[in-house]
Amino acid sequence: MAASAPASDDLAAHVPPGVVPTMNQVIEQLHQRGIRTGLGAFNPPGTKPALVGIAVPEGFAVPQPGKTFSFPRDHGAHPEFKLEWWYVTGHLYADGAGGRRFGFQATFFRQAAPDKSMQLHLAHMAIIDVATGKFLHQERLNRAGWDAGSAVETLDVRQGNWSLRLSEPAAAAGAERMELRGGVQAEAALALMLTPAKPLVVFG
């Protein structure tokens, strides 16, 4: 059974109509929302994570140096870790001279409950019209189930009708095509086929 965050936890509720929030304002709202929901993945603006004494949740794996990755498996979820995310950002250009420009962002989070009894899935999407400055954003929060989830064996994360999936097998790691589908506030929709232009780079 899916459970959504209260309306007051929607980031849009904290942004006055017609106002484009700064990145610090967005991060602050995500941080405050994370405190309320237990999905705190961000540090407050202007602060840095502690370099020592980092708490490791009991019973969860910790990233280790020297890992050998295997794709498409490692595009998928890793339930042995407490938190992970998949994100896509980019620029879109309309066809023709003087075409409109847009920026977009989509992020999918998976976080395990402390006792591993369930998986929580958070996703947020944003689109901005560069010319007009119109900024749309929306978020969703659900328990893993029929309306949200993340596959283990390959890239397949979903949150309702939002999804990021591996569209087809590839002969070599890094050549996979990915399909992003989603929308924001019923005003804009995304259906993008993403083709890598460079080899994979290990993050971190």
Image (cartoon, grey):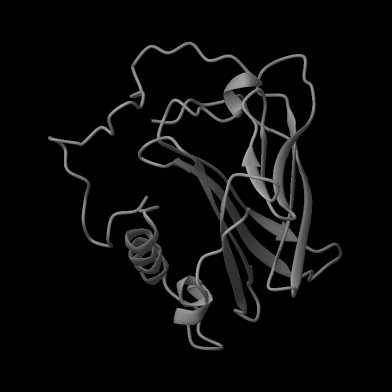
Count every numbered label the image shows and give the total: 0
Q: Position of residue 124 (x, y in %)?
A: 56, 59
Q: Horizontally, is 113 left or right of 51 in the view?
A: right
Q: Residue furthest right?
A: 96
Q: Is 32 located above or below residue 159 in the figure?
A: below
The residue sitting at 59% across, 44% down in the picture is 144
x%, y% of residue 67? 43, 13
Position of residue 118 in the picture relative to residue 43 (left or right): right
Q: Is residue 54 above or below residue 37?
A: above
Residue closest to the eye, 201 or 170: 170
Q: Nearer the viewer, residue 68 or 120?
A: 120
Q: Quadrant of the C terminus?
A: top left
Residue at figure coordinates x 70%, y 55% from the top left: 160
Q: Position of residue 189 (x, y in %)?
A: 77, 64
Residue that appears at 44% across and 25% down = 80
Q: Is residue 105 above or below residue 188?
A: above
Above or below — where is 65 with respect to 12? above
